[in-house]
């Protein structure tokens, strides 16, 4: 939170919304869909936050689609400190508690937020990838949440390869140019061509409605297609860190970057820094 700003009291989690089977599915598959976890007020907070974000993109924003694409894929990162709606959602909804229970962690820290909007008729795919190789963290206890404020059909939803969070790490590449801008070529194995043999992989994916939350591990392979027709897919993703996560500075710029962090947080240190506030603790 901003200095001196009141932290909203989080809405208590309705324990009927998170079962032992769902926690087990997260651990086994690396991805799970929690139906109607959010109430209408929380969905509206995110809708307002995304619309405000789109009107006031940060210097970190990028267009992740090609110029000739009839739609646009807009991304922005790390906006929670400036975006009141995002802050109210992150600190006032039960998402931190859910992350803690899924990660089986005693403490949950915010890592970062990520807005992903695909406008109508956007053809650009989000290619298969893992998230953690792009990051500056080490450890296993993490949880990403993918939350669409718009209904998303099965053909445009986020898909996952069940169990892929168990490893190995695979080469991260830029989405359009396919460049290895992070780990040097040869350091990690390349991704297989999943689309060429989809029947060979245990692919998970869910049609989602407003209020549903898809939770996944940062090493789970995932991808999504474009958005057909006149629909818009406005997504807010929030990433959380658990007890065993430590700082892993890289020799290259991570995505997202955290400028100056290496001067304040040594390698191997817990992520105890104002950029990564605690959002939940096990009582």
Image (cartoon, rainbow, N blue to C red):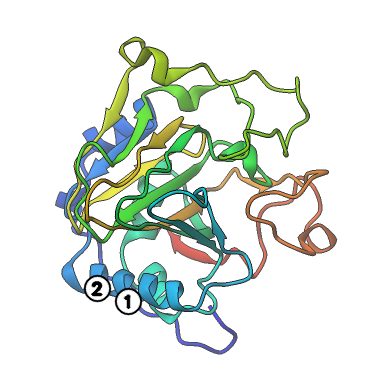
The Cα atoms of the two marked residues, 1 and 2, are separated by: 6 Å
Q: Which residue is mark 1?
A: 48
Labelled pair 1, 2 in contact (Cβ < 8 Å)? yes
Q: Does dot 2 land on a helix, a strand or a loop?
A: helix
When asked about the image quadrant of residue 153, the answer is: top left
Residue 63 in the image: x percent, y percent? 53, 57
Is 160 placed above or below 201 here?
below
What residue is shown at x 48% (from left), y 28% (from top)?
Answer: 165
Question: In the depicted view, which residue is nearer to us: 19 or 207?
Answer: 207
Establish if 84 lies above or below 111.
below
Q: Which residue is mark 2?
A: 44
Seen in the image, is 138 located left or right of residue 7?
Answer: right
Q: Quick check: 206 above or below 265?
A: above
Label 1 crowding class (10 Å Cα cut-off): few <14, some 14-19, many 20+?
some
Q: Residue at x 22, y 56 (%)?
A: 230
Q: Quadrant of the C terminus?
A: bottom left
Q: Residue reaching furthest bottom? A: 4
SS at mark 1 in the image: helix
Q: Residue furthest front?
A: 68
Q: Residue at x 41, y 78 (%)?
A: 52
Q: Does 258 appear above or below 217?
A: below
Residue in the picture at 49% in, 58% down? 75
């Amino acid at each position: 939170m901003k200095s001196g700003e009141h932290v909203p009291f989080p809405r208590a989690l309705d324990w009927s919304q998170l079962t032992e089977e769902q926690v087990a599915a997260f651990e086994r598959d690396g991805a799970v869909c929690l139906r109607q976890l959010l109430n209408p007020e929380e969905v509206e907070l995110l809708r307002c936050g995304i619309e405000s974000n789109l009107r006031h993109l940060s210097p970190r924003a990028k267009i992740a689609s090609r110029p000739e694409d009839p739609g646009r894929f807009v991304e922005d990162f790390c906006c929670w400190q400036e975006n009141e709606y995002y802050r109210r959602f992150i600190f006032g909804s039960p998402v931190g508690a859910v992350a803690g229970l899924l990660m089986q962690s005693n403490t949950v820290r915010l890592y970062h937020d990520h807005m992903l909007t695909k406008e109508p008729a956007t053809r650009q795919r989000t290619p298969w990838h893992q998230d953690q190789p792009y990051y500056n963290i080490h450890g296993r206890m993490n949880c990403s949440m993918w939350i669409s404020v718009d209904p998303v059909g099965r053909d445009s939803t986020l898909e996952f390869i069940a169990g892929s969070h168990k490893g190995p790490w695979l080469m991260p590449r830029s989405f359009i140019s396919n460049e290895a801008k992070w780990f040097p070529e040869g350091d990690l194995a390349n991704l297989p061509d999943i689309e060429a043999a989809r029947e060979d992989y245990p692919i998970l994916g869910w049609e989602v409605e407003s209020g549903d939350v898809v939770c996944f591990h940062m090493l789970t392979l995932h991808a999504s297609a474009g958005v057909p027709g006149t629909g818009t897919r406005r997504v807010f993703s929030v990433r959380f860190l658990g007890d065993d996560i430590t700082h892993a500075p890289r020799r290259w710029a991570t995505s997202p970057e955290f400028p100056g962090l290496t001067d304040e947080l040594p390698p191997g240190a817990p992520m105890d820094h104002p950029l990564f506030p605690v959002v939940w603790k096990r009582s």
